Amino acid sequence: MKKKVYRNTPAFVFLSWGSFAFFVALMMIGLYTLKEPLMVKGYYLMGSVGLISSSFTLAKVVRDNQEDEERYNQMFRAADEGSTEKEI
């Protein structure tokens, strides 16, 4: 049975999620202590939620495009190697 291999170490994953949670908490504390009407706090909160979710989506799209590009290059590299072997 093959062992599952991850790209990142558990320490790096913990650091990533920990820093994300820390900065979300700081943002919530900042919004809570903000001396503005509730409407302004809601505007900042929705802007922050949109920024966070779009950051995750953008990171996934960039990663997927990079993986697709690697797969595309491997496929054509294999096709080129196959065509040169036939010519010889």
Image: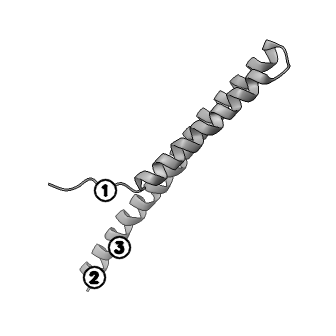
Residue 29 sits in quarter: top right
Residue drawn at x 43%, y 61% is 70
Residue 80: mark in rendering = 3
Secondary element at tag 1:
loop
Q: Residue furthest bottom?
A: 88
Residue that appears at 75% across and 29% down: 30
In-front residue for pair 40/32: 32
Residue type for callout 3: Asp
Residue 28 in the image: state x and y as whole percent. Answer: 68, 27
As measured in the structure, the alpha-carbon distance from the residue carrying label 1 to the one carrying label 3 is 30 Å
| In this view, 36 is above or below 74 | above
Give the residue at x 74% y 18%: 42
1 vs 39: above or below: below
Q: Is residue 64 visible?
A: no
For mark 3, does the 10 Å Cα neighbourhood hold few (<14), some (14 to 19), or many (20 or more) residues? few
Q: Are marks 1 and 3 in contact (CB under 8 Å)?
A: no
Residue type at mark 1? Val
Look at discs 1 and 3 and give the one toward the viewer. Answer: 1
Q: Residue at x 27, y 53 (%)?
A: 4
Disc 2 residue type?
Glu
Q: Which residue is mark 1?
A: 5
Please say if 39 is above or below 54. Answer: above
Q: As rendered, which of 86 and 25 lies closer to the eye?
A: 25
Tell which circle, 1 or 3, labels the residue nearer the N-terminal end: 1
Secondary structure, mark 3, is helix
Is the residue under label 2 in contact with that under label 3 (CB below 8 Å)? no
Q: CA distance from mark 2 to mark 1?
A: 39 Å
Q: Which mark is residue 87?
A: 2
